[in-house]
Amino acid sequence: MDPIPPRVTVAAVWTGSDVDLRMVPIPELGPGEILVRVRLATVCGSDLHTVMGRRPAACPSILGHEAVGEVVATGPDANAQVGQRVIWSVTVACGTCGRCRSGLTAKCLSVRKVGHESFDSDWPLSGSYAAHLVLPRGTTIAVVPDALPDAVAAPAACATATVMATLEAADDLTGRRVLIGGAGMLGLTAVAACAEAGADVQVVDRNADRLALAADFGGRASDGGPVDVAIDYTGSSAAVADALGRLDIGGTLVLAGSVTPGPPLSVDPETVVRRWLTITGVHNYEPRHLHRAVEFLDRTRERYPWECLVTPPVALDEITSALNPPPPGKLRTAVCP
């Protein structure tokens, strides 16, 4: 007999200037819905941008979209079983609109996003900075292998899955010279993934502490020479322009970090044509990328020091201290609701 799920939970509600711990009722689950107990959440850079006022977001809301949890209850026809340890997609798609049917579920016409919805909406328990959250129908879930630690699995729901999408956009990397812009969580994950794919990986970052981590993940500091592929996670127009200028004939530039307004980039169409260049963008990811992320982390869990990038977890009532940049040598702050 399945255990009786709780009727209330505790959540950290972002109010625009502070975080309030509140007891929140757990609704009755509808068709396809899943109730998850959050085991561990990590603080993504986009959440830091929200609390610092650099990124617009629903308010009040429960932030947090990188987490691992345990299924404690399911609604009718849900695609999960009680007791499973899972991660879940950031985006929740309808599955029926034109974009979904064309394979762009991340850009669903009615997309909703974990950790991005108003607390006053019909989905208040939408974020991972809570003891429990509700996953609506349309949320992709992936079961976490037993040997994969929570601290390694949690970032897969955003950072690792997004990297999987950018590598797909870059196409075959075997034997290619790759430049990674940014040595944050996405950048270092991309370094390891590109190295695993057989690429020669260079990294650029203004932060010396982060750049120093690249060697542990199969990369090296940039030599300034031409590259075949450049993947930017910085969002800096200057960094993007530099990467574009380094592309060799037939090169590909993948942009993933430019998610807030910035100075426009000057692109010479003749150069793009004559040098046979490709410029493409990636925002969020598709369900297959979430599953690839879990497989990649599980396959490389003993090869790269993933767990060392995450701080020891703080309790939910210390969430305010976690909503700050992590200390040197760490790329994610962990919260244990």
Image (spheres, rainbow, N blue to C red):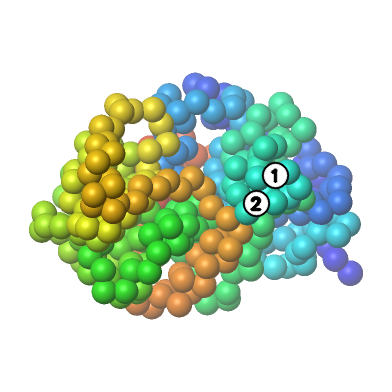
Tell me the SS state at disc 2. Answer: loop
Foreground residue among 246 and 162? 246
Q: Which residue is mark 2?
A: 102
Q: Residue 195 at what x, y percent from top left?
A: 30, 71
Q: Going 71% across and 26% down the picture, which residue do you hit?
A: 120
- Drawn side of residue 119 relative to residue 207, left or right: right
Kind of residue indicated by mark 2: Ser
In three-dimensional space, the C-alpha distance between marks 1 and 2, rounded to whole angstroms, equals: 6 Å
Residue 7 versus residue 310 in the image, above or below:
above
Q: Which residue is mark 1?
A: 98
Residue 297 versus residue 9 in the image, above or below:
below
Q: Residue 153 at what x, y percent from top left?
A: 51, 63
What mark, if any, has residue 315 been given in the picture? none
> Which corner quadrant holds the N terminus?
bottom right
Residue 309, located in which quarter of the rendered image?
A: bottom left
Q: Going 22% across and 44% down the picture, which residue do you hit?
A: 271
Crowd around label 2: few <14 · some 14–19 · many ≥20 (10 Å): few
Q: Going 40% across and 64% down the picture, which residue do you hit?
A: 171
Q: Residue 49 at what x, y percent from top left?
A: 41, 33
Residue 55, located in which quarter of the rendered image?
A: top left
